[in-house]
Every structure is written in structure tokens, then in C-alpha cells.
Image (cartoon, rainbow, N blue to C red):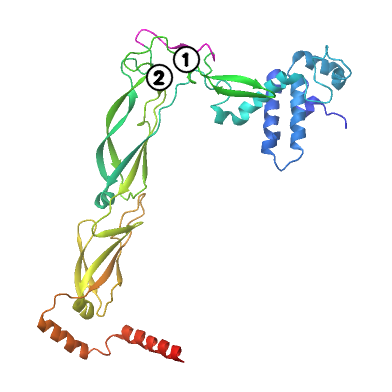
Amino acid sequence: MAKRDFYDVLGVSKGASADEIKKAYRKKAKELHPDRNADNPESETQFKEANEAYEVLKDPEKKAAYDRFGHAAFEGGMGGGGGGPRPGGMGGGQGDFASAFSDVFDDLFGDFMGGGRGGGRGRAARGSDLRYNLSVTLEEAYSGLSKMIRVPTSVACDACDGSGAESGSEPTMCPTCSGMGKVRAQQGFFTVERTCPTCGGLGQIIQNPCKVCAGQGRVEKDRALSINVPAGVETGTRIRLAGEGEAGMRGGPTGDLYIFIDVAPHDLFERDGNNLFCRVPVSMTAAALGGDIEVPTIDGGRSRVKIPAGSQSGRQMRLRGKGMPALRGGGYGDMFIELAVETPVNLTSRQKELLREFADLSEDNNPESKSFFSSVKNFWDSMKG
């Protein structure tokens, strides 16, 4: 199969500049990289074809030979003593290919490696994010609050203004990485990039470090912060305070502070989302006869609730809008009252006598018991059968 014209492969004109050729190659390499085209079996061949074209067109001498003789310039020993691409292949030696591939490698994976070629130059390290656990009561979660907290953290050194260098001196460019913050090593077709061991990736070294911070550009210190906790927070809510974390190394950007909320258990109320549940004990007589009871609400108020006659334990009644506020607006949840019918204890002789009399007269007043024991009798009869 005849080779395609190298200019057509990269999608550029014959008079394209070196920058246009390089830009077109990078675009093609991104589109055709096998890792991004797992479902296209032709992508690997097309990727190699684009590499071969770029290896020729990026070199002025090889490009001139190609413009004059076409593909024949690199076949049968032509092309200046073997300097051109190898017949039918990737061209020009491992060093040239690795250099070309490292360009597209930077574009494809630069974000993960720290921003691509040159991205580490003079870059100061960002400070770490910090976490602060804050416990609040259910009442505070209901109303929201402002609170002062003290956070142990690192702040910029005042003596050196965060530079890490003693007053009157400045950091100098790292001689190992020339300020890049990274060094590269050739391994076959690939160029491996790693953090510079001399400067730790900062691109600079300090000959005369600050005596206060020992060249770090930051010192340990407790900070007092005022935070606003919005109404409706619940356990697990996270509040981000941008730029309130640890100071960066040698003037680097500051990290963030994350406040993690924990709402303490309450003696009266149990929370489920925006709803509240309150278990209220009622006497046996109140449950049987019905009546009104007064219950507390989370805002510190009171509500009267009517108990229907004949209420059983576990019965729930809803108070609309008496629950917790929604964190981002949207009203309030509900409050549910759950009745717990209480059996009297420590009865007097007279009370026991009245209850026995009541029991003798209550044979038809317990429908659930009557139904249950009827089912029990049927079960035993069936077992006998």
C-alpha cells in the first residue's frame, strides 16, 4: 500500500510553518492516541503514521529532502547518510521519536504530571487543606450560629514575607533543573519526568535561609477564625473556607479549611433529614379516654396535640412545619409525635380493686386482643388436626 503524503497525514499545507506543523501534529496525536481509541483498531497505525510524518517535517533538512524527492528521499540510502527515517518505519532514531512523543505526552497527561512542559518553573508548593471537626447542638443546627474557633496551622513567616530567604537575599534558580522543578530521564522510546531532587520541585534553592522559619517561608501558629454555621446543617455537612488552610511553602498559595459538622444527640428529639420525632408518654386513661397534651418544639415553643380516644402505643401525629429548616432554603420539615401508652406501677389496694372491676367489664373493649387470641386458638386447633 502506497504511503500517504506526509502533509495530508497531518492536515497542513506544503508551505506550513514549523509551529503550524507542530500544532497540527499534537492535535492529530491527541485524536489518534491508542489509549483514547480503544474501540478503533486502526488508531495505532494512524498514530504511527502521524509520528513518522512529524519526524520528517519538523526537521528542516529532512523536510527539504522530502519536498524535493518525496518518500523516495528516505529509501535506498538517500537522505544524507542515514539521518532520515528508517525504511517503512518510525524514523530517525529513538532519541528523535522519544522527543516527539514527549511533546504529545505532555499534552495528553500534563495535568496529572503538574501542568506539562515548563509548568514547574518557579512554582511554590500550595499549602495543605485543613479539617476542623465542629460539634453543635440540635438547637444550634436549627437556628444557625456564629462561632469563634482556634485552628492550629501554618502561616506565612513575617520575617521573610514568606520567601524563606533571609532579609536582603533572594532564592536562586535551581542548577539541577534550571528552574523547571522537574528533571527528565530517557528510557527507550519514553521520557520519564520526576520531581527535581535538589529543589523538591520548587525550581529554586535558598542559599541563605531565614532564621525564623528555617527557609520554609511559614511558621506554626494558632489562628482565631469566626465562622458562620447556616441553619439546617446536619452531621456530615462540610463548610469550605477558601484560603484559610495551611500557608504554602515559600509564598505558595494557601490551602483551604474544611469545617465538618457533627450534630449532637438530643434528649427529646430524634432527627431524620428535616423531620423530627418526639416520643411522648401518655397515661393509660388518657389514651383510653382521649384528651389534649402539650408537647415541646425545637424552637423552644409549645404545641397542643389532641389525643383521639382509644389511641394505642406507637400512634403518630404530625405537626406540619415544626421540624428542621432545609439547609438551602425550601421551608421546614415536620415534627411527628409518637405516643407511648404507659402502664401504671406501684398501685394502691383501691386502684387494684378498681382495675379488676374494670377488667371484668372490659371483655369487649380490646378488639386487638380478641382478634389475636382467636387466631391463637385457630392455630392450636389446626396443630391438633
Residue neighbourhood size for the residue with mark 2, other residues' Cα within 10 Å, grouped as few (<14), some (14–19), many (≥20): many
Task: Using residue 105 as the reference point, say whether residue 272 is left or right of it.
Answer: left
State the SS at label 2.
helix
Checking the image for residue 204, the label placed there is 1
Instruction: Give yes or no for residue 323 being in the magenta stretch.
Output: no
Which stretch did the figure color magenta? 166-177
Label 2 – label 1 distance at C-alpha = 10 Å
Residue 72's x, y, as percent?
A: 88, 20
Task: Using residue 79 as the reference point, say whether residue 311 is left or right of it.
Answer: left
Asked whether 232 or 48 is in front, the reply is 48
Checking the image for residue 250, the label placed there is 2
Instruction: Give yes or no for residue 167 being in the magenta stretch.
Output: yes
On-image quarter of the N terminus: top right
Task: Using residue 172 as the reference point, say whether residue 304 is left or right of it.
Answer: left
Picture residue at 52% right of the left edge, 21% below the top = 120
State the SS at label 1.
strand
* Amino acid type, callout 2: Arg
Q: Which of pointers 2 and 1 lies earlier in the amino acid sequence? A: 1
Q: Could you tell me if the residues under marks 2 and 1 are in contact, i.e. CB atoms within 8 Å?
A: yes
